[in-house]
Image (cartoon, coloured by chain):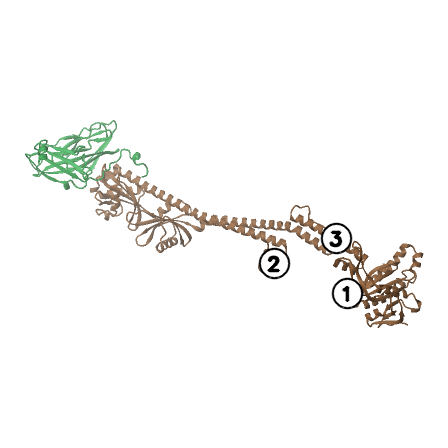
Chain colours: A brown, B green
């Protein structure tokens, strides 16, 4: 699985794992949060609506109770003997009657008291004597009383632009003599009396042409805003709606009121922001919880990623060590783990062991054979067989070493020999030559194989000169406690190179006439007449090109060769100053 | 014609057989049917009557008398009663008493007198004080028999506590002479209500 993000690449596995886990968690958290938030909001609105509905029920109950109270007061009045007596005498004494009625109006907690005849004429009106003798202005409510079983009725009615709750009962003396009509105003005072539910506004509105507030617990500015809102777009009946008032947003519930001579409604309102405050608090807590959850999740994700990535990182570090050639066992990863990491660690350990083994072989090869040969052998399939190549073969031999070997202890002999060979080998290496083998106190060196070198002859000559110079240095250091001399023979020829021996054990070497000639030339340096430590064949000198000072030594016949070969004494590089 | 002859056998001269029904044809009880001589001269036959307090009710419910009659209100109950009327035709006030008042009340003004008891709201009686002595109150069958009428022309009217409008609206003229008279009234009644004996029990607190 690969996660690619445009413009962004993770540099570490741990980063990528952390990112993926964290992204998933964030999506999950966000989804949960938004779901909870949504449910919370819906619940909040439902709460407000249900609060308003409850408020409406409470309001209706209170209003009914208040009207019932008025009705009971009216009923008591209907049977009151003193009032009946006053009424019986009222024809001759209207002033007394009106005063008694005002008294009763106050006792009944009403705002007006009108006595209506059975023929619907106003007999007395507590407030306005001008109504006396005229037709009652709310005949429908009297008719309703007449049609009821007990002669009583109650309801709402508009009178002079004011909304009243009105009750009608018959004045019984003892049979109905008149209609007692008591009413109280639905005004701000009454609205305040009903306002028992906290954080709730009550407004009574009547509609003639436009909606108008007749009573409210709102302040003036809010009241005006409500009137304007209702006239712009009336609230739906018995369903909640939103109204923006001067002091904020309100959820409103309009309940129509049954009015005998008009239209009116009561509007209950709750301020949305107030109501949502507790839910907002819950939202904030939720947000904090979600944030904390995310932070903890992030830590867990980070830790988890580390746990998963750590063994991989360790393996990577081990791999780096191995790349640098350090095979020592560092494995931090528990290979006993049952999971894929454990399997990987096991494979890694086996692979490391294999690599270490191969390197050890290569090292050994490098020590036994020349590094170039060893590399070539490792590079190629180590199979038997050879090829013809033109190479330069160099033979060197330390003179008089056998007498040293007799005189000194073996360890010292080996030390002297090793010192000599070490320095010589370094020079051979430096010139790209390959030490084919050490032969007693001599060595056989090949230039031009196994690695192709076009200038193998020149390299061989340079090496020969340097080896001889180095021997002088060694002598100055008195490395063998007496002056040592060596002879070097160099010859260039076509030879066979390759792996020779049995399939189980073989050497990379060169064979052919040329090898023998080179050995023979080395032997010729022992001839004092030649007065040289380095004898090279003409073939080598030609192959090496200019750049060397030589002295011709004439021809020499070599066993196995029909024609004698031309030999030279190698003196120095062309531009070196030579004493003789 | 045959039916009339059959009926005439049961109605004697000087009598009026009246039947009162309501607008739906049901017989109307407690209706006072009274005949006033068109000549305007009604004989004075004032008498006395009783309206008793019995089982915390007035008995009878409707009483008709000629103006000038005396009515006493004996209390037959073991508890006291306070009878009163604020009707213009006869106002009186008999504060709590037991037994029979020493003096009966004189009803000398024609009109309807409603009698109540101040301490028992449901107790109610009507006295229909008439100028004429020719009247009768219907029974449960809605029938009333007016007797002892002199021959002549009469205005016959009917009154009932729940009568809608004035009695004169239902006035009928009849000649009482050799043949017995029969009269039928179909009257409009108001839906009636009376104070209940136990308002709380029947109405409850809320309706």
Mark 3, Cα crowd under 10 Å, few <14 / some 14-19 / many 20+, is some
The location of residue B134, given as percent across then percent down, is 11, 34
Left/right of residue A261 with respect to residue B36 in the rendered view:
right
The front one of A160 and A550 is A550
Camera-side mark, 1 or 2: 1
Residue A568 visible (yes or no): no
Q: Which mark is residue A9?
A: 2
Q: Mark 3 highlights which residue?
A: A356
| Quarter of the image where the N terminus of chain B is located | top left
Element assignment for label 2: loop
Looking at the image, do the residues carrying marks 1 and 2 touch, with CB atoms under 8 Å apart?
no
Camera-side mark, 2 or 3: 3
Camera-side mark, 1 or 3: 1
In this rendering, the count of numbered labels is 3
Mark 1 and mark 3: Cα distance apart in space: 29 Å
Left/right of residue A470 with respect to residue A264 in the rendered view:
right
The front one of B168 and B100 is B168
Looking at the image, do the residues carrying marks 1 and 3 touch, with CB atoms under 8 Å apart?
no
Residue projecting furthest to the left = B178
Element assignment for label 3: helix
Q: Mark 1 highlights which residue?
A: A452
Q: Which mark is residue A391?
A: none
Left/right of residue A31 with respect to residue A152 in the rendered view:
right
First-in-chain label (2 vs 3):
2
Which chain is disc 1 placed on? A
| Residue A19 location, quadrant | bottom right
The location of residue B114, given as percent across then percent down, is 20, 36
Residue projecting furthest to the front = A562
């Amino acid at each position: 699985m690969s996660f690619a993000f445009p413009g962004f690449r993770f540099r570490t596995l741990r980063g990528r794992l952390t990112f993926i886990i964290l992204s998933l968690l964030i999506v999950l958290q966000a989804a949960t949060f938004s779901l909870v938030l949504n449910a919370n909001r819906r619940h909040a609105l439902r709460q407000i609506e249900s609060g308003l509905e409850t408020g409406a029920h409470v309001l209706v109950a209170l209003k009914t109770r208040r009207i019932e109270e008025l009705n009971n007061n009216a009923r008591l009045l209907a049977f009151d003997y003193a009032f009946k007596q006053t009424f019986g005498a009222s024809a001759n004494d209207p002033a007394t009657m009106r005063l008694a009625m005002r008294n009763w109006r106050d006792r009944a907690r009403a705002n007006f008291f009108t006595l209506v005849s059975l023929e619907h004429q106003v007999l007395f009106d507590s407030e306005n004597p001008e109504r006396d003798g005229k037709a009652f202005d709310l005949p429908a409510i009297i008719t309703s009383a007449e049609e009821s079983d007990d002669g009583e009725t109650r309801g709402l009615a508009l009178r002079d632009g004011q909304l009243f709750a009105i009750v009608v009962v018959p004045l019984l003396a003892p049979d109905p003599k008149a209609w007692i009509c008591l009413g109280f105003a639905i005004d701000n005072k009454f609205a305040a009396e009903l306002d028992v539910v906290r954080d709730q506004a009550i407004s009574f509105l009547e509609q003639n042409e436009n909606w108008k507030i007749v009573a409210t617990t709102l302040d003036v500015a809010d009241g005006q805003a409500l009137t304007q809102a209702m006239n712009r777009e009336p609230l739906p009946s018995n369903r909640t709606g939103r109204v923006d008032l001067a002091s904020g947003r309100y959820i409103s519930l309009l309940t129509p009121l049954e009015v005998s001579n008009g239209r009116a409604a009561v509007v209950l309102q709750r301020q949305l922001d107030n109501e949502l405050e507790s839910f907002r608090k819950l939202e904030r807590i939720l947000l904090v919880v979600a944030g904390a959850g995310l932070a903890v999740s992030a830590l867990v994700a980070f830790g988890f990623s580390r746990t998963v990535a750590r063994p991989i990182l360790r393996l990577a570090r081990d791999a780096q060590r191995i790349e640098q050639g350090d095979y020592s066992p560092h494995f931090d990863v528990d290979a006993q783990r049952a999971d894929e990491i454990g399997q990987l660690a096991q494979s890694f350990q086996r692979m490391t062991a294999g690599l270490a083994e191969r390197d050890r072989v290569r090292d050994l090869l490098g020590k036994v054979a020349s590094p170039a040969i060893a590399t070539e052998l490792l590079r190629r399939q180590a199979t038997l067989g050879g090829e013809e190549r033109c190479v330069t073969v160099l033979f060197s031999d330390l003179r008089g070493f056998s007498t040293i070997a007799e005189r000194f202890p073996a360890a010292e002999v080996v030390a002297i020999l090793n010192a000599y060979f070490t320095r010589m080998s370094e020079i051979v290496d430096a010139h790209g030559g390959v030490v084919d083998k050490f032969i007693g106190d001599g060595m056989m060196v090949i230039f031009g194989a196994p690695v192709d070198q076009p200038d193998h002859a020149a390299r061989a000559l340079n090496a020969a000169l340097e080896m001889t110079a180095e021997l002088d240095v060694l002598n100055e250091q008195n490395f063998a406690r007496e002056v040592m001399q060596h002879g070097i023979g160099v010859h260039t020829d076509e030879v066979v190179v390759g792996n020779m021996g049995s399939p189980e054990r073989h050497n990379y070497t060169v064979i052919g006439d040329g090898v023998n000639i080179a050995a023979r030339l080395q032997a010729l340096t022992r001839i004092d007449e030649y007065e040289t430590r380095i004898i090279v064949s003409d073939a080598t000198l030609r192959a090496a090109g200019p750049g060397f000072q030589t002295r011709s030594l004439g021809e020499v016949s070599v066993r196995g060769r029909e024609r004698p070969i031309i030999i030279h004494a190698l003196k120095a590089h062309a531009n070196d100053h030579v004493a003789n | 014609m045959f039916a009339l002859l059959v009926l005439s056998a049961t109605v004697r001269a000087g009598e009026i057989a009246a039947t009162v029904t309501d607008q739906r044809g049901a017989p109307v009880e407690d209706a006072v049917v009274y005949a006033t001589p068109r000549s305007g001269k009604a004989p004075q036959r004032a008498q006395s009557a009783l309206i008793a307090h019995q089982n915390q009710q007035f008995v009878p419910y409707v009483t008709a008398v000629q103006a000038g009659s005396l009515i006493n209100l004996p209390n037959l109950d073991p508890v006291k009663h306070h009878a009163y009327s604020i009707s213009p035709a006869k106002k009186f006030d008999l504060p709590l008493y037991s037994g029979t008042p020493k003096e009966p009340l004189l009803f000398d003004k024609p009109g309807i007198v409603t009698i109540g008891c101040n301490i028992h709201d449901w107790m109610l009686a009507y006295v229909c004080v008439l100028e004429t002595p020719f009247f009768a109150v219907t029974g449960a069958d809605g029938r009333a028999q007016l007797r002892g009428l002199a021959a002549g022309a009469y205005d016959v009217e009917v009154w009932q506590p729940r009568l809608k409008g004035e009695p004169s609206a239902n006035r009928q003229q009849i000649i009482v002479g050799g043949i017995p008279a029969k009269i039928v009234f179909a009257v409009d009644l108001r839906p009636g209500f009376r104070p209940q004996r136990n308002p709380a029990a029947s109405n409850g607190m809320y309706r």
